[in-house]
Amino acid sequence: MDNGTARDRGRPGRQGDDRGLQRLPARVAALILLSALGALLTAAVLETQAGATAYIIGESHWSKAQQRAVHGLYRYASHAQPADLADARAALRIPLGDRDGRLALERDPVDLAAARAGFLQGNNAPDDIGRLIWMYRVLGDAPYFRDSVRLWREAEVELQHLVTLADDLEAEQAQGALDPASIQAYQRQLMVIDARVRPKELAFSRSLADGANFMRRVLLALSALVFVVLCAYALYVVRSTLRRVRETESEFRMAFHQSMVGMLKLDREGRLTQANEALAQILARPLPELRGLGLADVLHADDLPRDTAGGIDWDRVCEPGERRFLRPGGDVRWVRWTASVVDARTGCGEGVFVLAEDVSEAHELACEIAHQASHDELTGLINRREIARRLGSALGSARGCRRRHTLCFIDLDQFKLVNDTCGHEAGDRFLCQFAQHVAAQLRRDDWVGRLGGDEFAVLLHDTTLEEAETAMARIHAALGEDAFRWNGRMFGLNCSIGVAEINDDAVDVDWLLRAADAACYVAKEEGRNRIRSYRDSDPSLSRRRRELEWVAHTQLAIAEQRLLLYAQRIVPLAGEGRLQYEVLVRLRDREGEVHAPGVFLPAMERYGQGMAVDRFVVDAVCGFLSRHPGHLAQVELCHLNVSAQSIADPAFLEHVGLLLDRHPGVAMRLCFEITETAVIANLDDACRFIDAMRARGCRIALDDFGSGLSSFAYLKRLPVDILKIDGAFIRDLARGESDLALVRSMSQMGQALGKVTVAEWVESEAVLAQLREVGIGYAQGYAVHVPCPIGELVVDESVDALPAGALAEPA
């Protein structure tokens, strides 16, 4: 059984109270309905009385008109005066109008317009006509009124006799004067009709009066009955409601004092008029001591809002939120504050009920989470996100208040050495010690944070660039006097520092970090363990800034498919050969200008982005050759340059391997060119890459051969197919014997090792002749072929576009 159900079944009284409260709206509706019924009965009594009165008045008009008609005809029979006949007929129009009104109400359907016209003709008051019609339609078959209507119909029979008698008299008088006997006969008929009508008129009035009195008594009795029922039911509802209110109040008081949530009530002066035990526990005070304390005695001053007059701002007090309670010892407890007005008649300051839930532990946990989100777990310094937020604030103050601050970018010089030789635990200790030493050198308003890895950021408040240089020189000197010791080994706390001023010229936080990082980078390039400041006039920083801009431009060009593929042919120096060329890359900016690789490739490789270009070129070339099988059949070799970064990255090797597995026919036509310096620096990685590519049928060329000419021993380990002699030896070949001797020795070495030799940078016919003489196999340069868009090498085949923009247009 559900625990909540068991508790409900164990408390039938509570369930009954709940049902009683649920039925309270229905009971109130019943009271309203009974009250409305009583009012309706009262209105019916008044309306019935008014209707009976209207009929009695109408009967009076009817009776007077009938008598007037009899008298007029009586005189007309004696004197034959037309005026008497006209007066009689005018009087007859009144009862005849009442008859027409009654007949209109008895039609099916009822003709209300004719009824109103008839009753108006009957000389009834316009305000009474509605009552006459309502009473006839509603009470037409009621006791007494039914008899009155019957008498009305019988009287109308006599009325019709009067009409007929008037017509006969008018006809007789028109033929000549009546003799006395005829006159007396007519007058006797008139008296007989009048005698028969009068009792009916009196009976009609008495019947209406009796009926009205009967209906009034019935309706009054019903009204009294409804009133009695209404009073009894109202007393029952009030008593049951009061009982439940008292029970609810009792339960509320019990819940108030036994609740685990602190509760209190305040008056308009801010005094605690009521409080429960939970609140006493939160405040660590006895419950009796709380009564009479002011809100200022228990609430932290910063959390007690005041108005302009120094009083309590009750509107803000009633706002929900978190506030701090003060304990006698000075301890603070955080509570979730919910206030509401319980007596609006006395204003918000009087009768404010407050719920105060102790959330100190949750608040501490939230503070801890917030601290973890904004601080580095290892060093305890603020992390990159918090650094960016604080830099944003510093930048805002520099702009709005024209203050100057300084950002210092610190990069450790020996962190990798410590990590590699002593392990990660030593590296962590090294970082912590360095962070403590830097923090100890700063002023109270300055701060240091960890950007990540071995990079730190320091902000010097209200400090110019020159002052920051002096301060960082002092810190740098203090760091140089200390050292990190681990297992008998000692490492200096050497670091390179870049300094950038935060002023109105700073664009945003990213710009600040880039500027300080650029200055730090220059410090490293100049020999490490030194300080450099960021100034726009510094040529080293300007060069780095331009390189970073080209990195950004190139990355965007790759994303927007604006790298173009060009090609330069490689031709044999003896005999004819099949088509062979090297793929070159160009960058087209958004304005349409095409840039040579020497503008952007060095920057990409300098900042570790060379693999992005290599991947783009390999993907584009494989797609191009796959879409042009006729051109692929004509090609002997398509040379592709691969940077040292790509060779050393296993992800690039995996990407190219999967790509060539999907295009096995293309792989047989590709030759990857690797620079000699890259091979020497990464011999194991180079061997791994070469073996993987040759396994798929690709050729390998050693590019810039001779530039690393310290030893040829590595050639034994490298299964390369082609030696491309560095153009620095070829360009000045015709000017001296030394370069010619070197090229001859390289050619002989290549022949001895079974390698194909290619000379680069061939720019004249004289150089071509010398290359033939020394036995070089192939030549490449402007004297042989000027680079062109790769699509121009496709013969007799419609050239589909490379992936958006990759196929070059003529420069």
Image (cartoon, rainbow, N blue to C red):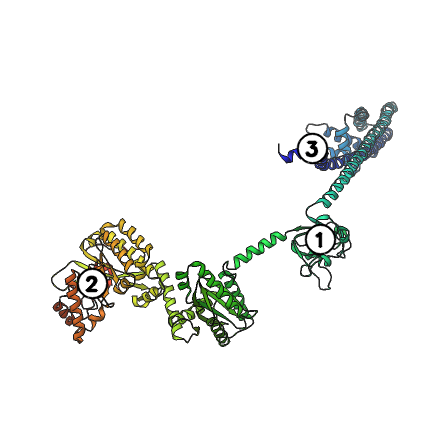
- Secondary-structure class at tag 1: loop
**Label 1 or label 2, whichever comes before in sequence order:** 1
Q: Nearer the viewer, mark 1 or mark 2?
A: 1
Residue found at the very far front of the displayed protein:
488
- Secondary-structure class at tag 3: loop
Q: Position of residue 556 (x, y in %)?
A: 37, 61
The residue that mark 1 highlights is 284
Total marks in image: 3
Q: Nearer the viewer, mark 1 or mark 3?
A: 1
The residue that mark 3 highlights is 10
For the residue pair 734 and 286, the one nearer the viewer reads as: 286
Amino acid type for the residue under numbered disc 1: Ala
Rendered residue at 44%/70% (across/down): 497
**Label 2 or label 3, whichever comes before in sequence order:** 3
The residue that mark 2 highlights is 723
For residue 518, side relative to residue 770 (left or right): right
